[in-house]
Amino acid sequence: MRTIHLLLLAICLLAAGAYADPDTTKKIPDPETLQNRMWQSGRLQDFRLDGFLHITTAKGKDIYHAVTMRTRDRMMVFEFNDNSLQIRVIFMPNGSIIQNRKGANSDWELVTGKDRLAKILDSDIAYEDLGLDFFRWSTVKPVGMDSILTLPAWCYESTPPIVSNYAKIRFWVSSEYLAVLRADAYNANNEIIKRVEVNGVMKIEDAYTIKEMMVSTMIPGRDLSQSRTYIELRKGQKGASGL
């Protein structure tokens, strides 16, 4: 069976475009069933991935940070090699634990409350985005059946039970692969403010993982990005996470 890395499954939000409204007359799995299925299938490959965090600011300035990403089982660790910042995400059945520290010799500290809303290195990625908690939020409702780039998909809408950058998130899950194919984050005015797209994947031995992902901060009410952040991974090793 083809092995696909959970990071790709969980955050591969496909390119923006025109999508039909979900068919609300067709029954899809209830949220609890979905959450249980995704938890059972969601273990990370043992990978070490090296590349760059590439930020294109609203003024068009390009900023690069060298990054090493380590994944295994229910854990992801990001190491930003040019400024000593490290971030650890531990996935739990009902949410995620997010921690950071300044270098390998420092203690891990919890990132909680409003600190989870903060941007990472002034990028378009917030701490809460790394937790991928939206499909595990307590308030998730089924919307209907849909198709994303010819793949049949279940559509859901979730609202955060805690403080968040988003008023709601609508997301689509592949009924075949249990992969989140798309997610739109909205503000209180029902306008999309965050979009993520996977621009490429790479194969490492018998497993697949992300090669380039783009996270865009959108101009509210317009289908245009204000700034963008790319996670560009250039090489990877299986069984080398060190976790």
Image (cartoon, rainbow, N blue to C red):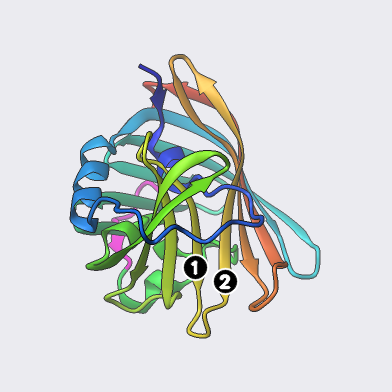
Q: Where is the N terminus found, in terms of image quarters?
A: top left
Which sits in the foreground, 102 or 7? 7
Which sits in the foreground, 172 or 74? 172
Looking at the picture, how far across and down is residue 235, in whole percent? Answer: 58, 27
Q: Residues within 10 Å of mark 1 (few under 14, many from 20)?
A: many
Is residue 112 one of those drawn in magenta? Answer: no
Whether residue 28 is visible: yes
CB atoms of marks 2 and 1 within 8 Å: yes
Q: Quadrant of residue 2?
A: top left
Which residue lies at the image location 57% right of the left edge and 47% below the top edge?
Answer: 14
Q: Residues within 10 Å of mark 2 (few under 14, many from 20)?
A: many
SS at mark 1? strand
Residue of label 1: 185
Looking at the picture, how far across and down is residue 124, in whole percent? Answer: 58, 63
Residue of label 2: 192
Which residue lies at the image location 45% right of the left edge and 74% below the top edge?
Answer: 166
Q: Magenta segment, which residues?
A: 101-111
On screen, residue 23 versus residue 105, left or right, reads right
Q: Quadrant of residue 134?
A: bottom left
What is the distance, in whole Å, between disc 2 and disc 1 at their CAs?
Answer: 6 Å
Q: Amino acid at mark 2?
A: Ile
